[in-house]
């Protein structure tokens, strides 16, 4: 760029020759503009200039010779051949060299952050860029703003370079205040941009995410051996997408298929591929776990940047807005949290005894459920006999054991393995139905009553066990004692002739009890034989038959005996005896007198 007066300096674009100004995204300067033009040709710029230093546009672009000497800092207007609009403008960056004209320029490197921001911000258009010059014809907006941005590019690209002894910021005090303020504001903003990421204009945004953003696996996702659920990656302008578990130990749970059904390589996942999390249910345990799946990829980035072009050292380099395509690794991970909340099993049953025709509810029976890995849970039968174990981790072999039986007629001896909650297709709700304890003891209750229905106290009985249906009617007291049940270790059993028979005596209500009579698998008839009656009552000679007693009998087997003999009173017995003797004497005397008189007559 040239001036027509000595004080009007030739403004030429400064090349980024100062150390550290070249753009360096990762410490390396770009060697070429990827898909940007590798060379550009600029038109004739020698007789085309513009200035707006006094707030009004002056230029010879339309051959305006009358204004040729008006305004400071006239800038050569440089455009790329074949381009129109703001994208055609080329900015000089070296203040000390002449501007190129009708030259073929070759791509060199990417401009530094400040210069790039100025070039790319200019391309946004009037009233969209950071600064713009109003007060000119609408048709001159691009040309006026070009002059404004060119001035600031000179100042930030080559601040120490001089032309004819002057720096690029010479004569600023002679500028229109409004224009001067715009220059300073624009310069201050440009210097804030230190790198390409803050100064380029991205033309295609990239996205990479999971659908859904989090994955919850639970009971509804249990299929056979595994909790399974699908997900996809959603990407835009991405390639070489990789999907992994953030913690490598969970990598085994990931798999998937492509849309055509082929198996996915997790090192190369496409947008919309069908991915899957599959967790063996045994791995979930009781409490479950969570892990994260990450996705990384490469962004097919396109951005508007400023590229430096040059043609040797005799002319200055220029900055040109262009589009750069590049591949950018996404260093940030896209994450999806997978929560595995395991399905928990349930075991339930009803606890009963065989007594009362299998109707005995064994309330209070306590069970313990255990597994080999230390799991333990206790539950107690309720009023209905129901026992329920909840929240049982699947995949375990459990053992169920009866540990407490409050009903003395039953022994707590039930135990079994529970295998339904493991295997290839575990059940989640196991109902064992009704579990029966075999009745071990029967209790007998005898009533002895008199003819008026009152209980007779003091009667003694023994109990004899006989084969069901066998004939048994009368037995002597001596034989009854020999056949009677004996008490051994708290149980009433037959045999054991070396022990005394167990004798039950009626209480004040006339009741006698035989408790803890040991049962076996067969039915038997039992006979209660009275071996001693209380004073004033006859001995009952017919045994009380208690028929078909076994494990399904009621808990208390009842029998009754009624004494048919009127008891002899014990009160006033001497008077009754005297009366009887007197009557007997009178009868004897009468009979003797009659016999004597009959002999005299003969």
Image (cartoon, rainbow, N blue to C red):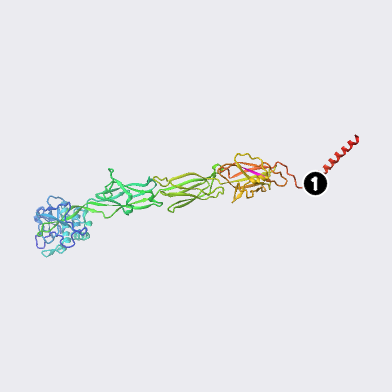
Q: Nearer the viewer, residue 451 or 292?
A: 451
Residue at the front extreme of this rendering:
498
Q: Nearer the viewer, residue 503 or 107?
A: 503
Which range is magenta?
Answer: 526-530
Q: Is residue 366 left or right of residue 89?
A: right
Q: Nearer the viewer, residue 470 or 540?
A: 470
Residue at the bottom extreme of this rendering:
165
- Is any part of residue 455 visible from this angle? no
Q: Residues within 10 Å of mark 1 (few under 14, many from 20)?
A: few
Residue at the top extreme of this rendering:
602
Q: Is residue 538 left or right of residue 212?
A: right
Q: Whole-percent x and y of residue 50?
A: 13, 56
Question: Which part of the image, by quadrant, shows the N terminus?
Answer: bottom left
Q: Residue at x 31, y 48 (%)?
A: 255
Q: Is residue 61 left or right of residue 337?
A: left
Number of marks in picture: 1
Q: Is residue 115 magenta?
A: no
Q: Whole-percent x and y of residue 111?
A: 17, 57
Q: Whole-percent x and y of residue 187?
A: 20, 60
Q: Whole-percent x and y of residue 481?
A: 65, 46
Q: Nearer the viewer, residue 95 or 515?
A: 515
Res 538 quadrant in image:
top right
Chief secondary structure of the magenta span? strand
Q: Say above or below: 118 vs 349.
A: below
- Judged from the image, the secondary structure of the residue bearing numbered disc 1 is helix
Q: Is residue 333 left or right of residue 438?
A: left
- Is any part of residue 388 visible from this angle? yes
Question: Which part of the image, by quadrant, shows the C terminus?
Answer: top right
Q: Which residue is mark 1?
A: 575
């Amino acid at each position: 760029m040239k001036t027509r007066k000595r004080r009007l300096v030739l403004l030429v674009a400064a090349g980024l020759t100062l150390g550290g100004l070249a753009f360096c995204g990762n410490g390396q300067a770009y060697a070429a503009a990827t898909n940007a033009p590798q060379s550009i040709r600029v038109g004739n710029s020698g007789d085309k200039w513009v200035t707006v230093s006094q707030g009004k546009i002056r230029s010879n672009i339309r051959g305006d010779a009358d204004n040729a000497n008006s305004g400071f800092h006239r800038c050569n207007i440089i455009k790329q051949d074949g381009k129109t609009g703001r994208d055609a403008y080329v900015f000089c960056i070296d203040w000390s060299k002449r501007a190129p004209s009708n030259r073929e320029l070759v791509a060199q490197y990417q401009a530094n952050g400040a210069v790039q921001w100025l070039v790319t911000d200019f391309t946004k258009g009037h009233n969209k860029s950071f600064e713009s010059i109003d007060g000119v014809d609408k048709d001159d907006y691009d040309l006026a703003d070009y002059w404004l941005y060119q001035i600031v590019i000179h100042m930030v690209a080559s601040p120490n370079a001089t032309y004819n002894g002057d720096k690029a910021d010479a004569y600023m005090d002679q500028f229109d205040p409004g224009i001067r303020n715009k220059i300073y504001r624009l310069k201050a903003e440009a210097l804030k941009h230190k790198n390409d990421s803050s100064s380029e204009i991205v033309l295609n945004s990239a996205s990479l995410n999971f659908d859904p953003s989090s994955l919850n696996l639970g009971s509804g996702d249990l299929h056979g051996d595994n909790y399974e659920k699908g997900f996809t990656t959603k990407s835009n302008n991405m390639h070489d997408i990789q999907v992994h578990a953030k913690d490598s130990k969970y990598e085994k749970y990931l798999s998937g298929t492509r849309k055509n059904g082929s198996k996915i390589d997790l090192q190369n996942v496409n947008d919309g591929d069908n991915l899957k999390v599959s967790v063996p249910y045994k791995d979930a345990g009781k409490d479950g776990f969570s892990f994260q799946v990450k996705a990384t990829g490469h962004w097919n980035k396109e951005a508007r940047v400023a590229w430096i072009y040059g043609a040797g050292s005799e002319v200055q380099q220029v900055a040109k807005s262009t589009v750069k395509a590049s591949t950018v690794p996404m260093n940030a991970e896209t994450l999806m949290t997978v929560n595995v909340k395991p399905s928990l099993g349930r075991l339930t049953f009803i606890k009963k005894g065989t007594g009362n025709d299998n109707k005995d509810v064994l309330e209070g029976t306590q069970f313990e459920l255990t597994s080999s890995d230390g799991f333990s849970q206790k539950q107690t039968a309720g009023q209905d006999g129901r026992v329920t174990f909840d929240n049982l981790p699947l995949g375990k072999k459990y053992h169920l054991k009866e540990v407490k039986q409050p009903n003395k007629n039953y022994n707590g001896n039930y135990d079994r393995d529970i295998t339904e909650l493991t295997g290839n297709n575990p059940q989640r709700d196991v109902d064992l139905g009704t579990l029966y304890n075999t009745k071990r003891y029967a209790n007998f209750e005898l009533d002895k009553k008199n003819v008026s229905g009152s209980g007779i106290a003091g009667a003694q009985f023994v109990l004899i066990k006989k084969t069901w249906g066998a004939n048994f009617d009368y037995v002597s007291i001596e034989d009854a004692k020999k056949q009677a049940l004996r008490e051994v270790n708290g149980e009433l059993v037959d045999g054991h002739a070396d022990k005394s028979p167990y004798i039950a005596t009626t209480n004040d209500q006339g009741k006698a009890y035989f408790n803890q009579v040991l049962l076996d698998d067969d039915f038997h008839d039992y006979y209660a034989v009275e071996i001693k009656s209380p004073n004033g009552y006859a001995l009952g000679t017919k045994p009380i038959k208690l028929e078909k007693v076994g494990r399904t009998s009621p808990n208390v087997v009842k029998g009754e005996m009624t004494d048919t003999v009127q008891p002899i009173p014990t009160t006033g017995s001497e008077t009754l005896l005297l009366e009887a003797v007197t009557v007997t004497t009178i009868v004897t005397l009468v009979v003797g007198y009659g016999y004597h008189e009959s002999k005299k007559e003969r």
